[in-house]
Image (cartoon, rainbow, N blue to C red):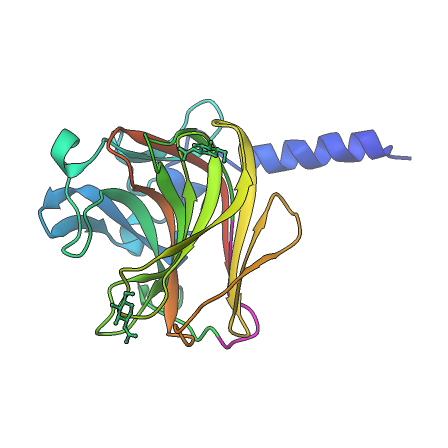
Amino acid sequence: MLSLFHALVWWVACVVAALNPLCAPGGNFDMRYWNLQLPIGSKGHPTTISSADLQGCCGYQNWDYFFTEHSDGALVMKVPGSPSSAGCVTTAHSLHCSTELRELDPANGKPSSWDPNQAVNRLFARLACSQPGDGAGTVVGQIHIDDSVSTKPVAELYYDADGNLTVGVERNRTGGNQVRFPAGHVPVGQTFTYEIRYESNVLSVIIDGGCPQVFPTFQLDAPRSYFKVGNYLQGSTASDVHFFEIQVTH
Ligand SMILES: *[C@@H]1O[C@H](CO)[C@@H](O)[C@H](O)[C@H]1NC(C)=O
Ligand SMILES: *[C@@H]1O[C@H](CO)[C@@H](O)[C@H](O)[C@H]1NC(C)=O
């Protein structure tokens, strides 16, 4: 009979083997769900890599920003610093540089969004933040509003220089008045999981499989939204985030 210990070893081996260090990130992560924004390109127009170009073991990688770690197969996303310290490139509406995946409709590879009143809208990730950047650190997951007027996130999960996790929630669709709530603490470099849910019009975050922490959404009133996941630097020094699992469920 297989002991619990052997079952565990087998399970761990399978999970580890699931990440092939010889593949680009597209060989280990389902890139039908994502395109990639990089902190390079021209000001206001950061370079975007399409889902089609990211997919598969021979998909896109870039040794400065987005690549597979040879030791463990992790997907590494790096940001060199802030626009003023590192000369990196932001979107028209942001002061911060990011190496970040943006949710797509896997059926057609186009940017998609969903209704927060649906029963299931979840972003799950297993990650380690070896270098959060100084001060406010980096945003490792977010829900972004998808409408023609708003350029704001609904909520952002921050991992700061000390490993504090906080959830920032906008008060309304115009934005500019984000409220921050403590959500946990994970020592810098330690692997953890998060799940961000925005479903049945309730926003919640689960850290390391704990209880859902529910956050108010003020006057947001369930705007159509999409997920982003990666490394959206808020500080000014370089940041480095390693992902071992990324899962979207609707
Ligand atoms: C992290 O949280 C601790 C305890 O609340 C606080 O003292 C520290 O300043 C926080 N770190 C950052 C970078 O804000
Ligand atoms: C949204 O919040 C901002 C910042 O608090 C405020 O200036 C603005 O008037 C609010 N917009 C609406 C439509 O309530």
Q: Is residue 56 visible?
A: no
- Quarter location, residue 159: top left
- Quarter location, residue 50: bottom left
- The image shows residue 99 at horizontal and vertical percentages of 28, 42
For this orientation, the residue located farthest to the top is 71
Q: Residue at x 81, y 30 (%)?
A: 5
Residue 119: within the magenta?
yes
For this orientation, the residue located farthest to the left is 42
- The image shows residue 148 at horizontal and vertical percentages of 22, 74
| Residue stretch rendered in magenta on the structure | 117-124
Q: Residue at x 75, y 34 (%)?
A: 8
Residue 224, above or below 127? below
Q: So how many labels did they put on this image?
A: 0
Q: Is residue 39 left or right of residue 124?
A: left
Give the quarter of the figure containing the N terminus: top right
Q: Is residue 23 left or right of residue 126?
A: left
Residue 191: within the magenta?
no
- Quarter location, residue 112: bottom left
Q: Is residue 61 left or right of residue 70?
A: left
Q: Residue at x 33, y 67 (%)?
A: 145
- The image shows residue 57 at horizontal and vertical percentages of 39, 40
